[in-house]
Amino acid sequence: MNQPKVSIIMGSDSDLPVMQQAADILDQLEVHYELTIVSAHRTPERMFDFARMAHNRGIGVIIAGAGGAAHLPGMVASLSPLPVIGVPVKSSNSIDGWDSVLSILQMPGGVPVATVALNGAKNAGILAAQILGASDPEIRNRILKYKAALEESVLDKVRKLQDKQGR
Ligand code: RP5
């Protein structure tokens, strides 16, 4: 069985359409992950158990997404020695997403959460792979290839624009 290296957690299944983007890019980068629901408010004991045990199960990075009063990433970061990447989700109970952005971003000193953009789960997945890639040459090489492909896709658009302009 492939041991998951990244844990993707979210406060509710309603966060899944956004958080699936983290899973998709990790699939593309061939990084094994697990994905589940852990709610800081509705399942606090599950959150405690998860955060206290994740590093003992071989997880290296946690991606935590939540909307509204988004306490999940910060609370998990307060309990876990692992790096936590927070994804603010624009949820049905969110006021324009600002509530989740600020809840995840404005952590007190001593308890960092690496916060990505609103609904920025894709970048959370890439960042998780980059953190693992710092000590895993195979993942690092996949990140290098991903970046080269990104560059090529933009250069392709430049060429197409130039062609349209007859240059
Ligand atoms: C948050 O409340 C969840 O992360 C979700 O973004 C939001 C709404 O949850 P549901 O009412 O859709 O389950 O805790």
Image (tube, rainbow, N blue to C red):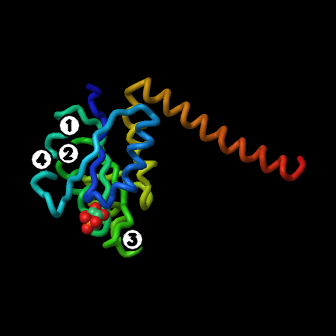
Give the mark nearer the N terminus: 3 vs 1. 1
Disc 2: CA contacts within 10 A as few (<14), some (14-19) or many (>=20): some
Do the residues under discs 3 and 2 have CB atoms within 8 angstroms? no
Q: Which amino acid type is shown beneath numbered disc 1?
A: His
To which residue does mark 4 refer? 49
- In the rendered view, would you say 1 is above or below 97? above
Q: CA distance from mark 3 to mark 4?
A: 29 Å
On screen, residue 152 versus residue 5, left or right, reads right
Q: CA distance from mark 3 to mark 1?
A: 31 Å
To which residue does mark 3 refer? 98
One can see residue 70 in this view:
no
- Label placed on residue 80: 2
Q: Which amino acid type is shown beneath numbered disc 4?
A: Asp
Q: Residue 57: x and y, percent?
A: 19, 33
Q: CA distance from mark 1 to mark 4?
A: 11 Å
Residue depicted at 42% across the width and 59% down the height: 119
Quadrant for residue 35, please give it: top left
